Image (cartoon, rainbow, N blue to C red):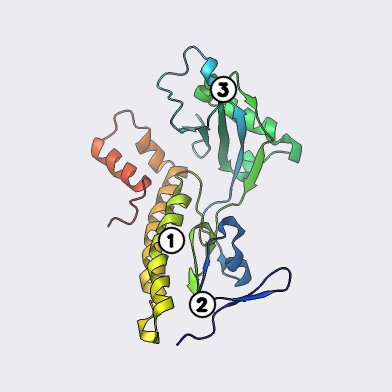
């Protein structure tokens, strides 16, 4: 009862035919490019500089007050509220270090200047400067600009897009991981119905059962990302007397409950 499925031509010329295709190509964004689905992501273009470091924190006596090496540390620049940092601990004294902000502020003057530029920014945040005073680079610093991405639709005849292959907002709240998992959980049972349907009316409605509900949660995350960069959310998160219930609700959304209406 199935119509002919999508045909894929590989680089070596071989052709594959599938009953249904799930694009989980992440930032490769295979079907978004092939099907010309890409559109304006509606977020400001930003840039990240990042690399691995031998953080040297174990040798500090003692580390900065309240610092726990088994947690991810997020920091904001003292005078540029739309510039933020991550410090993600790994084993053996290594960590991932990055800075994110408006492209015009973050972009290095030259390709080989990324290392210098990252450390200039790190040294401007007092807590990070103290924590990483003995740190040294463990690899070359990379840059990634204009990383936000969106598509005009998350499904089409014989295919659906999962995770970053469809939409990527921003690294700040790890929403990409949540959206990837949520999209896969929503798509899997629909594909099961797609492959066992014998009549068109038995096939899932990918618009109402996949795309629309998935985008509702993505829009919640988009509002959080926008509010982080325009200071509405940072003002709440960094408030000296945080309201317990508000803190609980923000934490719930950032833990992945963006679809809990």
On screen, residue 91 above or below 3: above
| Nearest-to-viewer mark from 3 and 1 | 1
**Labels 3 and 2: the sequence-earlier one:** 2
Q: For mark 2, what is the residue? A: 19
Quick one: SS at disc 2? loop
Q: CA distance from mark 1 to mark 2?
A: 17 Å
On screen, residue 227 above or below 236: below
Which quarter of the figure is the N terminus placed in?
Answer: bottom left
Q: For mark 1, what is the residue? A: 184
Which quarter of the figure is the C terminus placed in?
Answer: bottom left
Q: Check contact, mark 3 vs mark 1: CB within 8 A.
A: no
Q: For mark 3, what is the residue? A: 132
Residue 110 visible in the shown view: no
On screen, residue 148 above or below 251: below
Which residue is located at x 75 percent, y 37 percent? 112
**Labels 1 and 2: the sequence-earlier one:** 2
Few, some or many C-alpha atoms within 10 Å of disc 3 (few <14, some 14-19, many ≥20)? Answer: many
Which residue is located at x 41 percent, y 73 percent? 206
Quick one: SS at disc 3? loop
Q: Check contact, mark 1 vs mark 2: CB within 8 A.
A: no
Q: CA distance from mark 3 to mark 1?
A: 38 Å
x, y percentage for residue 200?
A: 40, 86
| Nearest-to-viewer mark from 3 and 2 | 2
Few, some or many C-alpha atoms within 10 Å of disc 2 (few <14, some 14-19, many ≥20)? Answer: some
């Amino acid at each position: 009862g199935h119509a002919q499925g999508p045909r894929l031509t590989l680089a070596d010329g071989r052709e594959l035919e599938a009953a249904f295709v799930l694009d989980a190509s992440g930032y490769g964004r295979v079907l978004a490019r092939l099907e010309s689905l890409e559109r304006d992501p509606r977020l400001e273009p930003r840039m990240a500089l990042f690399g691995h470091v031998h953080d040297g924190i174990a040798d500090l006596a003692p580390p900065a007050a309240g610092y726990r090496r088994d947690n991810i540390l997020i920091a904001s620049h003292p005078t540029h509220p739309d510039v933020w940092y991550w410090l993600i601990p790994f084993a053996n004294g290594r960590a991932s270090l990055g800075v994110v902000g408006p492209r015009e502020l973050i972009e290095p003057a030259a390709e080989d200047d990324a290392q210098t530029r990252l450390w200039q920014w790190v040294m401007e945040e007092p807590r990070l400067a103290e924590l990483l005073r003995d740190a040294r680079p463990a690899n070359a610093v990379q840059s990634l600009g204009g990383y936000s991405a969106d598509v005009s639709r998350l499904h089409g005849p014989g295919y659906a897009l999962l995770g970053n292959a469809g939409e990527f907002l921003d690294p700040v709240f790890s929403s990409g991981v949540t959206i990837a998992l949520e999209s896969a959980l929503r798509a899997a049972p629909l594909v099961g119905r797609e492959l066992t349907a014998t009549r068109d009316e038995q096939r899932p409605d990918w618009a109402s059962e996949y795309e629309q509900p998935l985008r509702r949660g993505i829009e919640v995350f988009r509002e959080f990302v926008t509010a982080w960069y325009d200071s509405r959310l940072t003002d709440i998160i960094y408030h000296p007397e945080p309201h317990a219930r508000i803190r609980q609700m923000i934490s719930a959304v950032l833990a992945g409950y963006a679809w809990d209406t």
